[in-house]
Image (tube, helix red, strand yellow):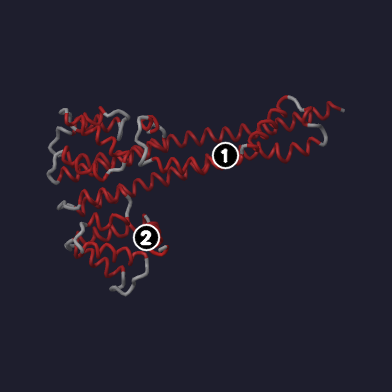
Amino acid sequence: MNGITLFPLFQTLEVKFLKMQFNFKLRMKFYHELIALLNAGYSRGEALEVIWRLGTNEGKDTKSTLARIYTDIRLKLQNGLSFGEAIRQWVSHDDYMILDTIEDSDEFATYLARYCKTLETNRKQNNSLAGLLGYPVLLVTMAYGVLAYFSIEIAPELSRLFPIENWQGLAYWVFSIGNFLALILPGVICLAVVVPLITILSFPRWSSDLRYHADKLPIYSVYRSWTGAVFLQSMGCLMSSGLSAMEAIGKIIPNANPYLRDRLEMVRYHMLDGDNLGEALSKTGGSWPDKTVNLSLRIFCQAPDFPKQLLVISENMLEERREILNRNIMMIRSVSFIIVFSTMLVVVGAMYDIQSQITSSY
């Protein structure tokens, strides 16, 4: 009984573990190999068969990550599933949404190459964000540590010469702050773990009215821009295949996460009232995916090559967002440096103040 109950759980965990191993680098390798074979004249089925043969050493390798994933995809395709459905459990939700969108297009390889470029741009942006934020976090942590260390280690030693209850002015003020920071340290550590986790989990799930305000924050604006870029690429691909904007949105919504679905439902509502895509996006509020882009779309909607313009706009939007983000992070770094420098000055000043109080007490 327990074995039957636990087997699906173990199977689910195994799939999640394999998906984690099928990381960004391996997915890019798979996509680029598929693009290269398609451009060489292979059909998609033939290209996937070649990738499977090479990835499994002609079927002899059945245990490596790529071999197991390629074999699973191949088996599902043989059972009649579409390419998007066959690969769905092994890739991110955004990857699946794009692959499902472009699957029936005659320019599948071209659109997949564009999406790979978008993925790489977003990867650079995320790496840049992590690197740029790491330094300010380190500096603020240092400032926190210096104040806490003063109250935990230095103050007790100085109290042997001059009791803490007799301290006054800057010295007592620094001790009080450091003591408070030391007391709340466990809570701060918990928040440092929980808040980033909740933030990451909220990206695709949080869709209430408050999210429109949160999207103005740098960390949420990154996700807003990314979902917007994926949406515009999907629209460009679908409309290039002959679908209207309304039909394209109708195809995207079923595969969208709660955050994206909420915005697309509002866009569709305004389009049913007769607005074009740019006007509908502008009326949804919250500047999704980007206020400037929405204004441009109101103009480009009139152009005969609008689907191609959507693809170009989506790529440019990520690059522009990356530049804005870098400027904001540089400002945060400067502020954090000032905080650390000021903290060091205050602690040094407190030491001199204590020395003065000890001298005057004798």
> Which residue is painted at 85% across and 27% down in the image?
361
> Which residue is painted at 75% across and 31% down in the image?
352
Q: How crowded is mark 1: few (under 14 residues within 10 Å), some or many (20 or more)?
A: few
Disc 2 and disc 1: Cα gap in Å? 38 Å
- Describe residue 196's horizontal placement relative to residue 360 as left or right: left
Query: Closer to the observer: label 2 or label 1?
Result: 2
Q: What residue type is labelled 2?
A: Pro
Q: Which of marks 2 and 1 is nearer the N terminus?
A: 2
Residue farthest along the bottom direction in this orientation: 60
The quarter in which the C terminus is drawn is top right
> Can you give x and y, in whole percent of width and height, for residue 74 in the image?
25, 64
Residue farthest along the top direction in this orientation: 169
Label 1: element kind: helix
> Which residue is painted at 24% across and 35% down in the image?
265
Label 2: element kind: helix
Question: Which residue does the numbered mark 1 point to in the structure image?
Answer: 188
Q: Which amino acid does label 1 sit on?
A: Val
The quarter in which the N terminus is drawn is bottom left
- Describe residue 355's horizontal placement relative to residue 241 as left or right: right
| Residue 206 occupies quadrant | top left
* In the rendered image, the vertical position of residue 56 relative to residue 17, given as above or below: below
* In the rendered image, the vertical position of residue 280 relative to residue 18, given as above or below: above
- Describe residue 138's horizontal placement relative to residue 252 as left or right: right
> Can you give x and y, in whole percent of width and height, for residue 200 in the image?
42, 43
* In the rendered image, the vertical position of residue 107 relative to residue 247, given as above or below: below
> Can you give x and y, in whole percent of width and height, for residue 228 in the image?
29, 39
Label annotation for residue 127: none
Question: Which residue does the numbered mark 2 point to in the structure image?
Answer: 8
